[in-house]
Amino acid sequence: MNERPQGWGGERSDSRGYGRGSAEAQPEGARSMPHVRRGGPGGPGGPGGPAPVPPQQQYGQQGGAYPPPDQYGQQQGQYQDGYGGYDSGYNTGQVYGSPGGPQQPGGPGGPGGPAQGRPARPAPNWRKRIKWTAIVVVAALVVTTVSTYFWADGKIRREVDLSKVIDRPAEGKGTNYLIVGSDSREGMSKEDKKRLHTGSAEGKRTDSMMILHTGDNGTTMISLPRDSNITIPSFKGSDSGKMYPARGANKLNAAYAFDGPELLVRTVEYNTGLHIDHYAEIGFDGFASIVDAVGGVEMDIPKGFKDEKSGADFKAGKQTLNGEQALAFVRTRYALPGSDLDRTKNQQKFLAALAHQVATPSTIINPFKLYPVMGSGLDSLIVDKDMSLWNLVSMFWAMKGVTGGDGKQMNMPIAGSVGGNLAWDMPKVKQLVNELKNDDKVTVSGN
């Protein structure tokens, strides 16, 4: 008789047919076979260990049944495969020899060990991060600065050619700028002219003129009254290139009206003997645009005045002037007791307030304010062909310094009047020019 262990034959071991040869689509159950355990101290079947568990009790009477979960050794991470204990390490997290078990020192999830299921993260290198952050910030600042420089330099209108000026005096020490405010209405609409009270006169004249001297012995700003009685010398036409004879005694602002900036420079040099290094001019609309772009300029007006021609209507006290009001303030002369001389003082006073307003941190570090201010100024500023952006910045900071008290402000010394025009005090003028040429401290006082 051929005896086979139970469940090895083709017979169906029970009504569900898990045995071999079963026609049902069920997986073949686990074969029942003797369970042999390796003996060992404290182990199943060994001295001091529990008795072996019969296969029928261990696996159940039905073929293919799995041992209950507690037989997998989950508490110790062991799986009994019938041939001795085999520790897979998956239950303890000791995969491929990882040291420590869960919640054990050095093990996953334990003190000093990485989080269970995640690799250990290296400590951040803060020195490296700070280094690269600093590099990025510096690079951004360099790119922004260079871009701003070329943007601003490209907007400068270099339209005045001082090489056309003839018979020029020798250069002295320091740098001399001729700064001009003209009544140019370039680009202004009829509405703008009406709003700013500029009128519609043809051509251009100079409403204000100043010499700004910078050097080792401080900065000096000298206002030249437009009604100064001077001599317009012979000159070379800036457009025609032809020579023209002297025009004789005239008002200073007439030189600009005859032949523009080049003749004005020629006239100032001829009557003073001072070499002009750079020229800068701004018109009505540009001046008002700068004031509006900076958000207005605060002024303390000691005595109120009203002037229908300029549109001025001011009360005494502190007040913030917008572009329209600022233009009226610097242009007014008929409502002032000293006429042209008082107007030049108002112009210097306003330039001081404007320079300080532009140079405040709220403007310098705020790109939403700085770029409109720079754009408004550069779009309307006309300079000589040799004026660099650096020269322009130097001129502005010198103006800010002298109007803020770091230097000297004065009018050209006046000795009286001739035919309604203001006559210069020539002995004082010569002393002043000599001090400026030698870059000495200015001791001459003006009106």
Image (tube, rainbow, N blue to C red):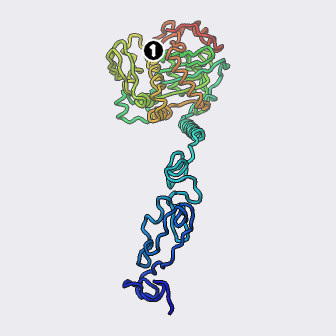
Side of 366 relative to 232 (left or right): left
> Can the viewer see residue 315?
yes
Image location (x, y in percent) of residue 409:
51, 13
Image location (x, y in percent) of residue 177:
57, 22
* Residue at the image point whose x is 38% and y is 13% from the top: 336
Q: Residues within 10 Å of mark 1 (few under 14, many from 20)?
A: some
Image location (x, y in percent) of residue 118:
51, 54
* Residue at the image point whose x is 44% and y is 73% from the top: 59
Give the vertical position of 434 relative to 67 (above or below). above
Give the vertical position of 420 relative to 52 (above or below). above
Name the element at disc 1: helix
- Rendering quarter of residue 289: top left
* Residue at the image point whose x is 51% and y is 27% from the top: 281
Give the vertical position of 5 relative to 193 (above or below). below
Image location (x, y in percent) of residue 109:
49, 50
Given residues 127 and 115, the one toward you in this image is 115
Extreme residue in the front direction: 47
Side of 85 relative to 287 (left or right): right
Q: Mark 1 points at which residue?
A: 345
* Kind of residue at disc 1: Lys
Give the vertical position of 345 relative to 47 (above or below). above
